[in-house]
Amino acid sequence: MTDTPIKAPRRQWLWIGVSLAMLVVIVVLLLETEDTADVTLADAPPPAQIVTVVEVAPAEAVATVTAFAELRPRWDAEIRAAVSGRITQVHDAALAGERVAAGTPLLSIEKTHYEAAVAAAELALEEANLALWQAENGVALARGEFERAGISPPNELALRLPQLRIAERTVASAEAQLEAARRQLADTEVAAPFSGFVTRRLASLGQTVTAGEPLVHLSDDHQFELAVELSQADWALLDHPINGKMAALFHRDGTSLGWARIRQGGGFLDQQTRQLRIFLDVVAPSDGVLAGDFVRVDFAGRPIADTLTIPESALTRAGHVWMVDADDLLLRVVPDILFRTDGTLIIAVPEGSGPWRIAMTPLASFLPGQRVAPQRTEG
């Protein structure tokens, strides 16, 4: 019974020793396994990255300059009262939204006062004509008396010529006053000076207006114009002289809207934008042309030699183009972009010699001098 307490601790230490020995063996095996994995060497280098390229050659390109501008009606005005008075009639054509032709009656202003002015002017003209007739008769009598006496008149006063000239000028003045009175009478009927849309009605039936007060706002529906601003670099790409040449118009969705003729261009810089302005008139506008619309304008430019046409996708956000040289190494180039058209970029030929192989879809992982495997596609 006295040996049991002594043997138990020995047995525990024995198991502890065995466990430690097994732990050491396992750790050694794991270390040897990791070292074996780490020293595994690859005899072949990693394969080069495949890059899709398009091969381009220098050629002559005809420049196309694109800009955007707002279509504006040639005539756009507030029609104002030329005379004062009470509005006695507002025609349906004067209501907002109506489309009217040139000469269509819009409003009527009370005309009694102006009819009286015409009658007074007619009376004044009749009196002036009578005075002229009397003056002419007096001159004729004076001439007859001097002829019968066989003597020459001493001066014009003896022949009553000053009275005749005054009578003639009085008639001319009376005629002008009558014409003015008739003009004011005609202005009591307000008509559309050009065809277009009534965008706003500013006067109402029974309202008393004064000369110069706005009545309706009229916007042309037949003649349109636009002003395009170009940078000096784009201006240099145009085929000069440009006056009288045509430019193509397109809607924002790409639909063709016809043509516009260049009326005038250049000559001065806009004080705010420092750009050159070109003024155009729309030729035979179609129903799709609406005032206030924002349209694309394409100008035909001059031919430019030694250019490359590359896809627009080849340009990175940083403004670079990646090329693959003859040794299949990547080359980063900052292109001189001349103009853009139909999803392509027209750039000046970079320094050096071809072939010009352009990476169509550059990646962020590209590095200058990196070897790649170019895969050619048709340009």
Image (cartoon, rainbow, N blue to C red):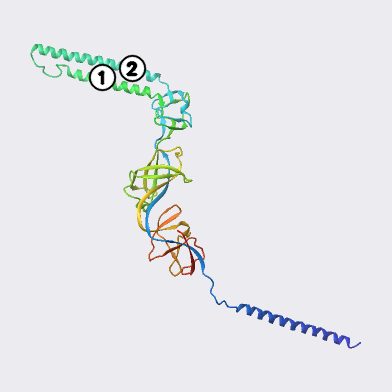
**Residue 71, relative to residue 302: is it above or below?**
above
Picture residue at 31% right of the left edge, 20% below the top: 178
What residue did someone put label 1 on?
A: 171
Picture residue at 23% right of the left edge, 19% below the top: 168
**Residue 167, relative to residue 82: is it above or below?**
above
Q: Is mark 1 on a helix, strand or loop?
A: helix
C-alpha distance separating marks 2 and 1:
14 Å
Q: In this view, does 42 lie to the left or right of 355?
A: right
Q: Nearer the viewer, residue 9 or 46?
A: 46
Amino acid identity at mark 1: Val
Q: Which of marks 2 and 1 is nearer the N terminus?
A: 2
Amino acid identity at mark 2: Ala
Where is residue 70? Give x, y as percent.
43, 43
Direction right: furthest residue: 1
Q: Is mark 2 on a helix, strand or loop?
A: helix
What residue did someone put label 2 on?
A: 120
Q: Nearer the viewer, residue 4 or 20?
A: 20
